[in-house]
Image (tube, rainbow, N blue to C red):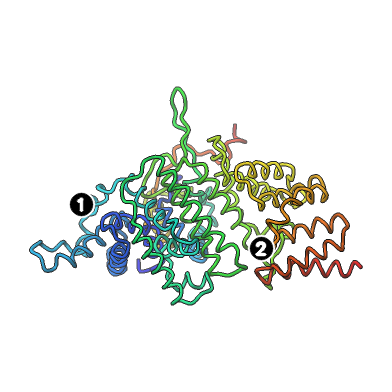
Amino acid sequence: MTDPSWIHGALVAARPQAVGALLRYFRDLDTAEEAYQEACLRALNTWPRNGPPRDPAAWLIFVGRNAALDRVRKDSRFDALPDEDRLSDLDDAEHAAAERIDSGDYRDDVLRLMFTCCHPDLPATQQIALALRIVAGLTVPQIARAFLVGDAAMEQRITRAKARIGAAGIPFETPNAVERAERLAGVAAMLYLIFNEGYSVAGDQAAAALCDEAIRLARLLLRLFPAEPEMMGLLALMLLQHARSAARFDATGEAILLDDQDRARWNPAMIAEALALIDKAMRHRRPGPYQVQSAIAALHARAATPDATDWPQIAQLYAALERMEPSPVVTLNRAVAVAKVAGPEAALDLIAPLADRLDNYFHYHGARGGFLLQAGDHVGARRAFDRAVSLARTPAQAAHIRAHLDRLMQAR
Amino acid sequence: MLYAIFCYNDEAAVGAWSQEEDEAVMERLAAVQAPLAAAGRLGPVARLLPTTAATTLRKGREPIILDGPFAETKEQLLGFYVIECESLDAALDVARDLAIANPGTGSYEIRPIRYYAPNAATDI
């Protein structure tokens, strides 16, 4: 029973519930975090000896609360509370604590903790950093590595974010149904930001961990709100994208396009889980952007070979997404599907009105170059690819477009 | 006697394992299964997707379909084994070995099987 990995798993799993309950109790983020840290230290000390408690989250909440209160009570006339070494044998004390925190409280505690991190005053990068620190429990150096900044800079970023939400005030009243739905939507968007932060960086371990965390937190949220089709869609979307992670980059870190990926290296368990979630979400007949995006990703995942991809269906789904959330990037993606169904000219017509708004967007020029090349306009394709290279954000993006340019040069 | 061993654990804790940890646990569990398989005593083995992928149909005049598992519990059914054992003690020994291979939180429920049709479709 000395293997620490199960303790680590139990502590990480209990963290959102425990910190969320302690936050409700102390109404202060730093106090809640310190109380949780103290409880973890005591768990590392007593759990290997006594075995795991029956309800780790309740144990951590109980012990964390007592540890924080002890500090206040030391000099007062109140009797000391039983220490946690005896406590873990005292099933009734633990049970009483667990019973007082019913599942409804758990739900709103976790949601509040996550929602606190997506305060609109915070820029996206601070929201993500804060959520990874407070909700997921990643260390500052872990987060700093994922964002490619120094530890001190990240520490400062998180401290500043905490000060801002402290000044703005955390909403402690129990949310009504409308507020709960708004909070869920805000948290869902934040989880997808975390995922994309990890997804956008090539084959980097620290960044890939962000994808795992986003998926883990989305599963937790869906367990608490099991009948939310958009949460199912979001989790499915992230699983389908993450399922390809082993196939997305070659040994030199160059991006491998979907068409060229070795589909045998896609993760079948993640795909199966995602498809099950999409099936469940469809039953609710309440479509939303995450469900549509996950349905598109599922059509790619279901195709055994690139040629078997159901492009007409994908083009339709992008059109549906365009109606729900009009954006030039969605139109650009629809154009890629339209090019497969109706040819490059139709795609070029579709993206022509986007030229101004997407002029500084790498993927616009990359895709446009591809359409022009297909249409036989080599001079236009070259110009578009040159522009894409100048806008590339990563070496892999630039290398990918240069490969097109090299082929164009050879064709001449 | 045939026994089912049902594996219960907090799926959030299992979900917090890193891929390396997960693979290491699966490898140790496979080592427990190997001698049973070699002796022809191992039946179906299943690891289930998370309960968020589950749907429940509650019977009634109009069956009700609910998202999620049958019951909301602190530990969830995450998988099961079917094994052939001479006695409860022998089945408990297997469960003990599984618990050593995968220590920490969770439980194994040992449940004797009343009716077993591994190839039900071809038997009918």
Q: Relative to residue A230, is residue A173 drawn left or right?
A: left
Q: Amino acid at mark 1?
A: Asp
Tell me if I can see residue B83 in this picture: no
Point 46% across, 52% down: residue: A187
Q: Position of residue A179 (x, y in %)?
A: 40, 44
- Of the 4 image quadrants, the one containing the C terminus of chain B is top right
| CB atoms of marks 2 and 1 within 8 Å | no
Asked if badges 2 and 1 are on one and the same chain, I answer yes
Residue extending farthest front: A356
Is A55 drawn above or below residue B57 in the view shown?
A: below
> Which chain's residue wears label 1?
A
Which residue does the numbered mark 2 point to in the structure image?
A248
Is A86 drawn above or below residue A308 in the view shown?
A: below
Q: Position of residue A14 (x, y in %)?
A: 36, 57
Viewer-proximal residue among A121 and A398 = A121
Q: Relative to residue A312, is residue A343 drawn left or right?
A: right
Q: Relative to residue B122, is residue A115 drawn left or right?
A: left
Residue extending farthest right: A412
Q: Position of residue A37 (x, y in %)?
A: 31, 67
Q: Amino acid at mark 2?
A: Arg
- Of the 4 image quadrants, the one containing the N terminus of chain B is top left
Point 28% across, 69% down: residue: A45
Which residue does the numbered mark 1 point to in the structure image?
A92
Instruction: Look at the numbered disc 1 and give the secondary structure of its residue.
Output: helix
